[in-house]
């Protein structure tokens, strides 16, 4: 995603110079030289993090030794647009419904995310009176369903919260009387 730092990791070495004395630079054919802190160690590991624009990048790590000789390697990286939070909705129980405190209550909802499959999202149900009720993984179609029992007597705000792979969330709520 273009709004998330992309980790860059490579290895450099030279027959004449120690790895840490090599001058290294990361670049992208789309974004040019990638600024940011570059970390090198004695084993030749080179790392950095960079925000990349959306598109297919040819990312190059170039190393130069004390004699001006250079070497490089390039990989192709695809970067998507900024992450979009998921969308979600409570389908059941309906807003303002009265439910039994003795019988199981069916909680149904739906979720979608334009950036990832619905079954890769994480869903959680909670109550303003009873706390966490259940966690679930939506179906491939985005359906979320669970039964809960033993709700406390009173007015509950039932919340469905859905989280994507980057922690972006959506929440939908309904008020129900138990």
Image: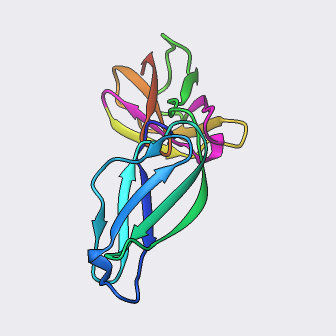
Nearer to us in this view, 112 or 154: 112
Residue 143 % position (x, y): 66, 35
Residue 99 % position (x, y): 50, 22
Q: Residue furthest right?
A: 141
Q: What residue do we see at 54% from left, 30% from top?
A: 86
Q: Quadrant of the C terminus?
A: top left
Q: Residue furthest front?
A: 67
Residue 92 appearing in the image:
no
Task: State whether residue 73 is above or below residue 117.
Answer: below
| Magenta highlight on residue 126 | yes
Question: Which stretch is magenta?
Answer: 106-129
Residue 132 appearing in the image:
yes
Count of number-bearing discs: 0
Residue 80 % position (x, y): 58, 39
The color scheme shown is rainbow
Task: State whether residue 159 is above or below residue 150.
Answer: above
Is residue 21 shown left or right of residue 51? left
Task: State whether residue 42 is above or below residue 175.
Answer: below
Residue 54 % position (x, y): 56, 36
**Quarter-wise, where is residue 43 in the image?**
bottom left
**Quarter-wise, where is residue 63 in the image?**
bottom left
Is residue 35 shown left or right of residue 139? left
Nearer to us in this view, 92 or 10: 10
Nearer to us in this view, 54 or 151: 54
Q: What residue do we see at 42% from left, 47% from top?
A: 33
| Magenta highlight on residue 154 | no
Q: What residue do we see at 68% from left, 43% from top?
A: 139
Nearer to us in this view, 102 or 48: 48
């Amino acid at each position: 995603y273009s709004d998330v730092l992309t980790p860059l990791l490579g290895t450099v070495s030279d027959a004449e110079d120690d790895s840490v004395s090599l001058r290294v630079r990361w670049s992208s054919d789309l974004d040019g030289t990638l600024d940011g802190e570059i970390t090198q160690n004695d084993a030749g590991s080179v790392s950095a993090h960079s925000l990349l624009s959306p598109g297919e990048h040819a990312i190059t790590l170039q190393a130069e030794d004390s004699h001006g000789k250079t070497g490089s390697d390039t990989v192709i990286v695809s970067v998507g647009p900024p992450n979009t939070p998921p969308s979600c909705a409570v389908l059941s129980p309906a807003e303002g419904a009265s439910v039994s405190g003795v019988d199981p209550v069916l909680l149904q909802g739906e979720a979608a995310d334009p950036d990832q499959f619905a079954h890769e999202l994480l869903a959680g149900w909670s109550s303003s009176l009873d706390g966490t009720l259940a966690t679930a993984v939506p179906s491939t179609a985005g359906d979320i369903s669970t039964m809960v029992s033993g709700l406390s007597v009173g007015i509950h705000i039932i919340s469905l919260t859905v989280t994507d792979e980057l922690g972006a969330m959506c929440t939908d709520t309904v008020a129900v009387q138990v």
